[in-house]
Image: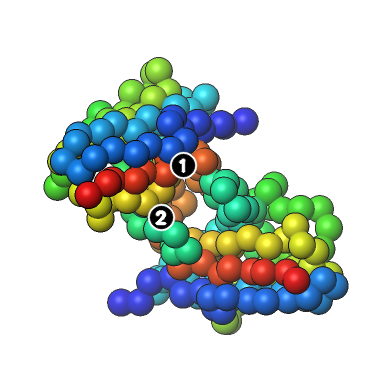
Amino acid sequence: KQEVTQIPAALSVPEGENLVLNCSFTDSAIYNLQWFRQDPGKGLTSLLLIQSSQREQTSGRLNASLDKSSGRSTLYIAASQPGDSATYLCAVSSARQLTFGSGTQLTVLP
Amino acid sequence: NAGVMQNPRHLVRRRGQEARLRCSPMKGHSHVYWYRQLPEEGLKFMVYLQKENIIDESGMPKERFSAEFPKEGPSILRIQQVVRGDSAAYFCASSPPGRSDIQYFGAGTRLSVL
């Protein structure tokens, strides 16, 4: 059974810092890995999707890496801003479902 | 090009009532998934449906919960005799044929049981 763990559960940083969020998964037989952003009381916004054959994806200040053999992914956020404050969810895809981590709650202080 | 539409956005029920949550997939998508997010937790898979067919319901509670995706109309997640522990956000996702690995999410329905 796939299990996804995200560390840390919460993170608070001053504006402008670069930061890394971590995600690990137990079963390397995945189709892809996706990072989502969730604002309080809101839905999910897809940030980056990495196919299982890829090593990384970049979008603006975000960079996500995938090491399938070790079951790890990182989300790097450069030059953080208060608007980045949200919960970040990692999800791995099997043939029929996504398995989510519990998220990292990020607060960027102005 | 509308995304995945869920309604209602918020639903309040008293214990013992029924809750019906609706999900219309993106245009051209034939697969629907339901996930539940309990307070302070990540999303948990509940059920995967295609038109008139349940493909995987391994995440559905054994009692009181059911889901359908009829030939016409939205997918419905139905919770009978709701209890306080059913209070959660319920998210629906859809995917195009043959691409269940890429899912697009709706804004969710937040169910509160009084």
Seen at 33% across and 23% down, the residue is: A67
Residue that appears at 30% across and 77% down: B1
Closer to us: A79 or A109: A109
Using the image, name the chain to which the residue with label 2 belongs. A
The secondary element bearing badge 2 is classed as: strand
In the image: residue A60, left or right of residue B62? left
Q: Is residue B75 left or right of residue A95?
A: right
What residue sits 22% from the left and 49% below the top?
A110
Q: Label 1: few (<14), some or many (≥20) within 10 Å?
A: many
Tell me the tag on residue A54. Answer: none
Q: Is residue B71 left or right of residue B106?
A: right
Is label 1 in a helix, a strand or a loop? Answer: loop
Q: Position of residue A21 (x, y in %)?
A: 34, 33
Give residue B75's position: percent from left, percent from top: 60, 72
Residue B110, how many percent across, how many down?
A: 58, 68
Callout 2 amino acid: Gln
How far apart are labels 2 and 1 at the CA level?
A: 9 Å
Q: According to the image, label 2 marks what residue?
A: A38
Residue located beneath label 1 in the image: A103
Q: Residue A7 appears at what percent x and percent y?
A: 44, 30
> Nearest the camera: B62 or B97?
B62
Question: Does the rendering let one see residue B93?
Answer: yes
Q: Amino acid at mark 1?
A: Gly
Circles 2 and 1: CB atoms closer than 8 Å: yes
State whether residue A91 appears in this view. Answer: no
Using a 10 Å C-alpha cutoff, classify the residue at mark 2 as few (fewer than 14 neighbours), some (14 to 19) or many (20 or more). some
